[in-house]
Amino acid sequence: STNQKLISISGDSIDVSAIASLAGPSVVSIEEKVTNGSGTGSGWIYKSNSSTSYIVTNNHVVQDFALSNGGSLTVELNNGDQYPATIVGRDSNYDLAVIKISKGNLPELALGDSSKVIVGEPVVAIGSPLGLSSTVTSGIISALNRPVTTGATGQESYVNAIQTDAAINPGNSGGPLTDEDGNIVGVNSAIASTDTSISGQAGNIGLGFAIPINQAKKTADQLIKTGKATYPIMGLQLATNYSGSGALVATVSPGLPAAKAGIQPNDVITEIEGKTINSADEAIVAVRTHSVGETIKVTYKRKDV
């Protein structure tokens, strides 16, 4: 037998209670009521002036209200006060929305830098899972740059997501994922599930996904300024049923960037900006991490026939 010993490793641990005290007052619960039902989600105060506060959340948290002819949208603050909310703008491409309430001088949540987070870094999720407001869970960043696709056909959201094992459940959507200093690094948006709970809603299995804050900030600023957000395109359609490695080009739109670069139908995109592309979803997510007007390097080859 080998001489093995169990040893404990000590070091600085994350102070979850301090983060909850610091960031908690900036986190809100959101409830939408429409003719055929209701739903809850989370959000956080992004900008607040003397009379108005702008709150970032997920598009899917407010979408039913936005598409309804009636109903209500209510924001509940950390102290229990409730205010009617209106939608400033929303974007299904990144699953983000900005809403506002007529209440000013509220604490804004400090922003982190999602480009600097690393796998293994401790994080805290704050929100209202299953309608339970002011819930705090902790964990680590378990992966980066996960291509995650959510939403119904025609309304898909493509996210280059931060993956975490901090417990996230329905209702956490739109709430913050913070670093150990209480700065938001991601917007909790989706979970992976192998089954459903008794209530018919998927539950946490340690695989949660958050929109990186750098992307969320860019989109939120556009929504506040114009009510709409932009996203970059190459000007092509990809074959979602292609089983080979890479992303197969199905059609190319004349006059747009892909056509100008010489990409043709039946080409297979293998790399974008040096990152290996294994599927159509990965290609879409890789493009959408960039801004309109940027130049990107795309590697492609002809499909083997």
Image: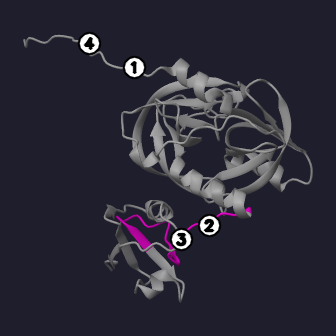
Label 1 Cα neighbours within 10 Å, binned few <14 / some 14-19 / many ≥20: few
Left or right: residue 194 compared with residue 115: right
Q: Amino acid at mark 3?
A: Val
Q: CA distance from mark 4 to mark 1?
A: 14 Å
Q: Which residue is mark 1?
A: 13
Q: Say if residue 43 shows up in the picture.
A: yes
Task: Indicate yes or no whether the magenta region holds residue 294.
Answer: no
Q: Which residue is mark 4?
A: 8
Instruction: Write down the region rendered in magenta.
Output: 227-248
Q: Which residue is mark 2?
A: 230
Work out which quarter of the rendered image holds the N terminus and state it: top left
Where is residue 285? Give x, y as percent. 48, 60
**Mark 4 or mark 3, which has the lower sequence index?**
4
SS state under label 4: loop
Q: Amino acid at mark 4?
A: Ser
Where is residue 278? Give x, y as percent. 37, 61
